[in-house]
Amino acid sequence: DTPVYILSIESSCDDTAAAVLQNAKVLSNVVARQDVHEQYGGVVPELASRAHQQNIVPVVDVALIKAGITREQLSAVAFTQGPGLMGSLLVGSSFAKSLALALNVPLVAVNHMQAHILAHFIDEDGFDKPEFPFLAMTISGGHTQIVRVNSFFDMEVIGETTDDAVGEAYDKSAKILGLPYPGGPLVDKYAQLGNPKAYAFTKPKVPGLDFSFSGLKTQILYFVQKNVAENPDFIAQNMNDICASIQHTIINILMDKLKLAVAETGIKQVAIGGGVSANSGIRSTLKEAEKKYGWKTFIPKFEYTTDNAAMIGIVGYHKYLEHTFSDASVTSKARIQL
Ligand code: KG4
Ligand code: ZN
């Protein structure tokens, strides 16, 4: 069989990424992170699209060179259609369209949130692939969902956030603590050194499988303001314990809903995906759940947690096998459903 080579491009937010896959195997996976946003405490859309413009050609070149593949060998070009920032998405889609036209190969449009889930189907030594149906919890800066995955392209959202995403809860908490954007990884780092039971935050009461994180953010804000009023050095003196307590609360919220989802669906295969699945606490708690509840869990390799193009490539590969192609009139979408 002749191998399928997919070039994939991801530009939905502030990372410019390209990857090359040979069938389900990743030959290269390149990400150019944009540091410009750090000083603004969040992603500035206008600056993100400009940086994508600057980065996209070199990032794609490096991905091809690292893979040892020429443009002429490519079977198809895949790109993120959405959801994401419109100006960022347009850079990736315009580039992908032009390249597919120039090379006369099919163009494949990929849903970013499907990609976070289907990243588990990348061939990696030591990583099992889930069997259908399985549950996937997508936890990122923009999304918090529990999805019943019936097959590659048949997914049902069975629970989601009613306000902030869990990544936002991390980033906003970090901001309250004076940490730079994106603060999630820093909260995680300090949390590992602190006492998770040092401070108690209450969990929101949300029915069913839905989530809410905006109340937690407000609670943390008032908690910090009150304590800083009494002791101006409160944050610096207790950073590890504060972060550990926040992380403990967030993990409890996520685990409560996952347990309920397993109980309601009877499905015990549980996968996570998205930037927050890089979190050390979530990863270890989920591993423990294998022994505790008899689940089989799927935790992505670290480089496939935060935004990357390899996950776009694996979806591209499966759509290529099904001949699900797009024509040049395909448009970027800031919002799309699973
Ligand atoms: O999937 P992603 O790269 O982009 C979106 O599609 O949103 O997710 C980024 C989010 C950010 O909110 C970031 O703070 C969070 O993932 N994140 C983490 C960790 N690493 C990244 N949150 C908690 N712990 C981490 N280790
Ligand atoms: Zn993402």
Image: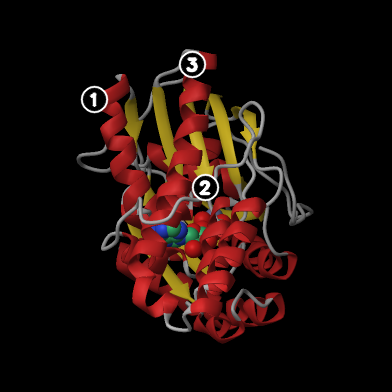
Amino acid type at mark 3: Ala
Q: Mark 3 points at which residue?
A: 263
Q: Can residue 157 be seen in this view?
A: yes
Badge 1, how many Cα within 10 Å: few under 14, some, many 20+? few
Q: Earlier in the sequence, mark 1 or mark 2?
A: 2
Residue 187, compared with residue 179, is above or below; it is: above
Q: Nearer the viewer, mark 2 or mark 3?
A: 3
Amino acid type at mark 2: Ile
Q: Does the residue labelled 2 lie within 8 Å of ligand 1?
A: yes
Q: Mark 2 points at which residue?
A: 139
Q: Name the residue under label 1.
A: 291
Residue at the image point whose x is 49% and y is 39% from the top: 254
Q: Position of residue 139 (x, y in %)?
A: 52, 47
Residue at the image point whose x is 39% and y is 24% from the top: 269
Query: Gap between marks 2 and 3, in whole Å?
Result: 20 Å
User: Where is the C terminus found, in terms of image quarters?
Assistant: top right
Q: Position of residue 183 (x, y in %)?
A: 47, 69
Q: Which of marks 1 and 3 is nearer the N terminus?
A: 3
Residue 218, compared with residue 61, is above or below; it is: above
Badge 1 marks a residue whose secondary structure is helix
Residue 312, compared with residue 28, is above or below; it is: above
